[in-house]
Image: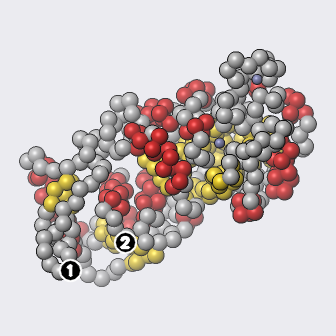
Amino acid sequence: MAEWTAVVRALDLAAELGAEEVLLLLDSKLVVEQIQGRWRVKDAKLALLHDEAIAGLRRFRRWSARHVPRSENSTADGLANEALDRVAAGGPRLVVRRPPSPGGGEPRSTQLGMDLGAGGPPGGEVGTGRERASGGAVAPGGMVALEAGFDPGDAGPDPGRLVVRILGSGTSQGIPRIACECQVCTSADPRDRRYRASALLSFGEMRVLVDCGPDIKWQAIAAGMRRLDAVLLTHDHQDAIGGLDELRRFNELRGGYLPVHAPPEDLAVIVSRYAYAFRPGQGAFFGIPQLRPIALDGPFLVGGRRFIPVPVIHVDRAITGYRTGGFAYCSDVQRIEPEGMALLADLDVLVISALRDQPHPTHQTVGEALEVIAALRPRRAYLTHLDHELGHAALAARLPAGVEVAWDGLELEVP
Ligand SMILES: [Zn+2]
Ligand SMILES: [Zn+2]
């Protein structure tokens, strides 16, 4: 655990300092082999840190990792002892040393914008030091250089069977709407009560949330959620992210931050809207969520399970659906271009949005969703993100074989 935490923090620090290449020197052969994808990570908690380390490495143009045997590691041991002494004497927790510039001169000091220490004071102090550490720990021989572009399909523990629970199946206002007396909003059928669209993916011990709208507290209670390991967001609209503050309870339960995955453009909006929740080390677990943004740029791992972002069009831009194994979840779909359709071939279960029957400028209709389903031919499909024009029973009665209406609390097993 300590080794993996150190790798994740070191990568954050290197990115913060503007590094384009990193060389990891580790005295754990196990961690080196696991980073390089040659050995599997079996422990579920370590698997999450492993995922994060791999995501962290993708930020660099080039990276490599090398094992330094303990016996050759006296420089690192010396630095660790020095750091312990420094902190015990009231010195800064973090000291950054840079090699001197090629023309000579003093090593540059560096100010960091974030405190990387867990539970430390906000805005970590940064001191300057001597240069000797910069290359001192490099031991001879045996370097394995890997180009960036690690295939996440190659590593991680056996992810286990997938169970998907629909936490919410309603459109942006949910059903019932405030102050609406329509037939569906006043329906006695419990399936006509729809929270904002969201799903919980369970595999092994892992619990992964897809979208986190303003109903998440009651959705989590209804689902009996006691654990959360990661959040995947489809886009930055408020009905998909308006519940992020509620996740602080899961920070308490897990005793640490939660990774939040989304493409960089969406993350930028989300981080600006919830800036307080994305500041490491501030007010940890005392009423402020601790979220860690992870920018997607291709397939990625969560708890050893491979996820593929699927571009779907919504309000004239690509947002993100997610595929893992034979399951895919596509919310807020207006249409899907061939590139996205190709990633949705041969599915066991597809959950896809269908707003209503009347055309809408940013969402596909039921008819259009059925056309997509007919083209993709998943073994089963479920319609979600429904508006109050669609009553459950009436809609279910007119859907073709293999297509059903999702409802809040529906559980799907994916082979
Ligand atoms: Zn209504
Ligand atoms: Zn939306």
Residue under the point 17% across and 80% down: 103
Q: In the displayed structure, would residue 329 be above or below residue 390?
A: below
Q: State the residue in front, 300 or 363.
A: 363
Q: Secondary structure at mark 1?
A: loop
User: How many numbered marks, from 0 up?
Assistant: 2
Number of the label disc, if any, that sits on residue 21: 2
Q: Which residue is mark 1?
A: 102
Query: Residue 126 location, x and y as percent?
Result: 19, 54
Mark positioned earlier in the residue sequence (2 or 1) = 2
Query: Residue 207 location, x and y as percent?
Result: 55, 42
Query: Residue 383 location, x and y as percent?
Result: 77, 40
Residue lying at the far bottom of the rendered structure = 141
Query: Residue 218 location, x and y as percent?
Result: 58, 26
Q: Is residue 18 left or right of residue 178?
A: left
Q: Is mark 1 within 8 Å of ligand 2?
A: no
Q: Secondary structure at mark 2?
A: strand
Q: Amino acid at mark 2?
A: Glu
Which marked residue is nearer to the observer: mark 2 or mark 1?
Answer: 1
The quarter of the displayed image where residue 81 is located: bottom left
Residue under the point 36% across and 34% down: 285
Give ligand 1's quarter of the image.
Answer: top right
Number of the label disc, if any, that sits on residue 244: none
Q: Evaluate whether residue 254 shows in this view.
A: no
